[in-house]
Image (cartoon, rainbow, N blue to C red):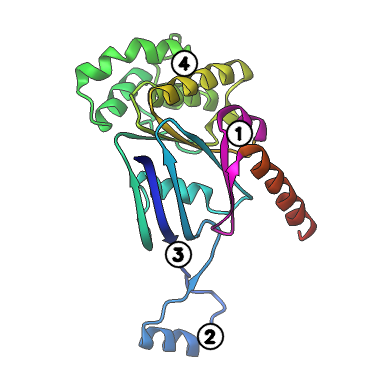
Amino acid sequence: MAAVEVQELVKHYRRLPHVGRSLKSAVIGRLTGQRMRVRPPGAIQGVSFSVGKGEAVAVIGPNGSGKTTLLGLISGVLVPTSGEVRAEGRVCVLLEAAVAFHPDLSGRENVLLQGMILGMTRREALTRMDDVIGFAQAEAYIDHPVRTLSLGQRARLGFSVAAHMSPDVFLIDEVLAVVDEEFHQSCYDRLRELRREGCAIIFVSHVMDQVREICGRAILLDEGRIVVDGPADGVIRRYEELAAQHRLHH
């Protein structure tokens, strides 16, 4: 059975009123109840795929192609316009822009909080504390408020928390871009361990060396649609061709 199943997934966004819109068109729209649907950056258009237990799949594509939106839909943070998405078991999400820590709590308090949000008891979260701190090499700052930590320190701690909370599905969006090379290898090793334990990994990145290191399969998105889904090396070549085309048109 697949760990993640996505069927004809669609996410549209309603167009906001334009400042230059005519009074006539505004009134007609209001009276008729018409709401225009468009494909702004991030919209998803009929995407279908599955990810097996223990499989690592990269989602790549140009900016605005829908990668982060797709992770939001899989995690349940976003609600689809139509279609279905199913993720089995405990889903851990790690985003570069917003590692889900409370800024005024210490790193240690946040580890406990994240564990309990994921359904663990306080005792279960505490049993993982030493592993989380040691992996992140966070001994020097674990009791400091998270707002005082650098982006790299938060990313290290965020990855370590998620990777030690027994995830069944691990969604990663660009977070490895802000940690140092030494920590990259520790992350790769931990992700391989998680795969052996049956964890499904969906990894978003613009760094193709990371994609090759972590994933044997990749999905290329463009304008919210799947362009190609297959072995990572071939999909990366197609992505590089697409990126070159985008540069020519801009």
Determine if the magenta segment contains residue 209: yes
- Mark 4 — residue? 136
The three-letter amino acid code for the residue at tag 3 is Tyr
- Label 4, label 3: how far apart the Cα atoms are: 38 Å
Distance from the alpha carbon under mark 1 to that under mark 3 = 29 Å
Q: State the residue at coordinates (72%, 46%).
A: 240
Q: Residue at x 31, y 15 (%)?
A: 128
Q: Marks 1 and 2, Cα distance to the nearest angstrom? A: 47 Å
Q: Nearer the viewer, mark 1 or mark 4?
A: 1
**Labelled disc at residue 57:** none
Image location (x, y in percent) of residue 239: 68, 47
**SS at mark 1 in the image:** helix
Residue 70 vs 34, above or below: the answer is above
Mark number, residue 22: 2
Residue range in magenta is 208-231
Of the numbered discs in the image, which one, if any, rests on residue 13? Answer: 3
Tell which circle, 2 or 4, labels the residue nearer the N-terminal end: 2
| Discs 2/4, front | 4
The N terminus, quarter of image: top left
Query: Which residue is identified by label 1?
Result: 211
Q: Residues within 10 Å of mark 4 (few under 14, many from 20)?
A: many
